[in-house]
Amino acid sequence: MIPATSPYPLPISYQVRKKPQQKPSESQSQPDAVPSPVVNTAIALEYASLRYQGHCPLGMYVTPSDDSLLIWDLVLFVHQGYYADSVLKFQLKFPANYPEKPPSVLFLTDVFHPLIAQQSGEFNLLAKFRPWRPKEHHSFDVLHWIKAAFKKHALDELKEIDCLNKEAFRL
């Protein structure tokens, strides 16, 4: 990756968007919401489980944020399909009541994708996790869905109602 202080500009497809100022939704962690020790432990265990074979998708790198265990910083290297050779930065944000509510996904890299809101970078998990089942769905399931969402077969199976970017869906 090119360091932030590099004199070389990033290609347009890799420009990192500024974090939008938006109202936190129910599924996003709120800055003043303090997670219980049980939630912190659950998130820490899910992070630790990423080292097991098959839990962390190939080409994806994860690290907890310096600010909070409720925020994970991720990079996805896409090698095939419409988005081949893309390097995508995004965040997984866990709500204070995780796993009862799903994490939210915010892409920091501008991506023209049917499941990603063009202005905010929000990724729609509901296309796969409707409803969210706390005992069945985990962060690694979310990560695998995010990676799959950039593959042709997943894009072909999307329904317009699930798309946050209708223009990208119609192409």
Image (spheres, helix red, strand yellow):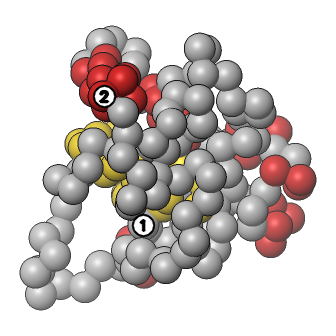
Which residue sits at x=36%, y=46%? 34
Q: Where is 115 relative to 131, above or below?
A: below
* Between 110 and 31, the one nearer to me in the picture: 31
Q: Amino acid at mark 2?
A: Pro
Q: Where is 98 relative to 6, above or below?
A: above
Residue at mark 1: 108
Tell me the quadrant of the picture where the C terminus can be found.
bottom right
Within 10 Å of disc 1 (Cα), the crowding (few <14, some 14-19, many 20+) is: many
Judging from the image, what secondary structure is the residue with disc 1 in?
loop
- Residue 58 has which mark? none
Q: Amino acid at mark 1?
A: Leu
Q: Where is 165 relative to 149, above or below?
A: below
Residue at mark 2: 37
Tell me the quadrant of the picture where the N terminus can be found.
bottom left
Which residue sits at x=38%, y=60%? 31
Q: Is residue 147 visible?
A: no
- Image location of residue 14, percent across then percent down: 39, 71
Q: Where is 46 relative to 95, above or below?
A: above
Q: Examine the image and state in which quarter residue 146 appears.
A: top right
